Amino acid sequence: MTSTLLRGRTLSFLRWPEAIDDHTAWRYEEDGGLLIRDGKIVAAGAYAQVEKQAGEGVRKIDHRPHLLLPGFIDAHVHFPQMQVIASYGAELLDWLNTYTFPEETKFANAQHGRRIARLFLDEMVRHGTTTVAAYCSVHKASAEAFFAESHDRNMLNIAGKVMMDRNAPAGVLDTPQSGYDDTKALIAEWHGKGRQLYAITPRFAITSSPEQLEMSGALCREHPDLHMQTHLSENHAEIAFTQQLYPQARDYTDVYEQYGLLGKRSLFGHCIHLSEREADALSDSGSVAVFCPTSNLFLGSGLFDYQRFRRRDKPLRIAAATDVGGGTNYSMLRTMDEGYKVIALNGEKLNPLQSFWQLTRGNAEALSVAEKVGTLDECTDADITVLDARATPAMRLRMETVETLAEELFLLQTLGDDRAVREVYVAGRPAKSDLIGG
Ligand SMILES: [Zn+2]
């Protein structure tokens, strides 16, 4: 079996960096090496040391002076919304009714689903993202298309068929029973097949009847190792409508709580307008709040209070995500740039080391997949993103005055996008240079 030896400046996180000079929180090698065999990192460290373990016939790829990081992780994204992104002029509920639901009806057609799944994963790779937690459409065929495409590429992705049985056009509705049956069939076919992971996916309380949320809770009990993903507390009109639909619930979070949907593998998109009680409930259950800055700004939903959520007595587990197509960019670099601004509007800062922790190890921990991805640790999967901080003339010029790693990372986050991603490895295989047009 051929091995590959990558050389470059390697950066991987051990834990949350408390401050910009908290050097023991990450491992950085100015001349680093990663030895890859059978899709896994088998040795990592100083190049001179790693090279000794490489043996004969190793394929050497020199990425100096670029940075080698763990592949980025996007914790909340809708693959059927590639032709919804950049739709003008609506807040959440109108945006869903005007643009999103009509678009998602197209995914009844399996061929359309397969085409968009292919283009979507191309776009992820192009932007340095190697793992996503994805919403498919309501149609079973859309999830089959996504998983087939993901499996062909040997990517570690989490996804699920959306369940929704009311308050949307007929073309995107299932029933509590068909949603349950289709989900069961998809779990049996795809969960644990290669690197694929299934997420039980009730879209949100507005589009699920109590019967459907009951069935979603049953699925979670029957498959406690699976993820559950949904939306929570994104916008005021949504919260008010939810309270109307579930008058007996104490608050929005309580709707999901009552059906047993909170837990360590539960991912709640947005979580912007939470009460203290709701934040406590999420924290007590180990649930994850997913920060989607470009989407929250674009739809005018509100400002996620990242640092306060982290520092409260009962802290929240936090992930970060694009939320395309409510989100406006596929890039996790662009996402963290907007995230920085949202946090700044809350009177706080997120330093660049914390930011890069979040989109690698932080998101991997939030998705409970850090044993496999999100670091450059030995024995993990070789999902790697190669970043070039001099990718454009403006970046090259700015780099002339950059002196530290933290400054370079902040430049990458502030000015970088897919052009800064020089190569991406998926389970050790060069994936970006494989794309047509690179
Ligand atoms: Zn979403």
Image (cartoon, grey):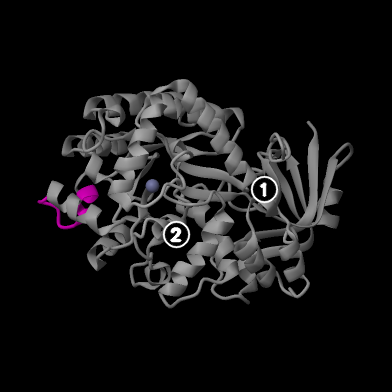
Disc 1, disc 2: CB below 8 Å? no
Q: Position of residue 193 (x, y in %)?
A: 51, 28
Disc assigned to residue 293: 2
Vertical placement of residue 311 versus 149, above or below: below
Front tag of 1 and 2: 2
Disc assigned to residue 384: 1
Vertical placement of residue 241 versus 308, above or below: above
Q: Secondary structure at mark 2?
A: helix
Q: Is residue 172 left or right of residue 126?
A: left
Quadrant in the picture for residue 167: top left
Q: Quadrant of the N terminus?
A: top right
Three-letter amino acid code at the position of disc 2: Pro
Q: Is residue 243 left or right of residue 345?
A: left
Q: Is residue 4 left or right of residue 330?
A: right
Three-letter amino acid code at the position of disc 1: Ile
For residue 85, say whether it is visible: yes
Q: Residue furthest right?
A: 56
Instruction: Looking at the image, tell me whether mark 1 or mark 2 is earlier in sequence order.
Output: 2
For residue 186, say whether it is visible: no
Q: Position of residue 295 (x, y in %)?
A: 42, 54
| Magenta segment includes 5 | no
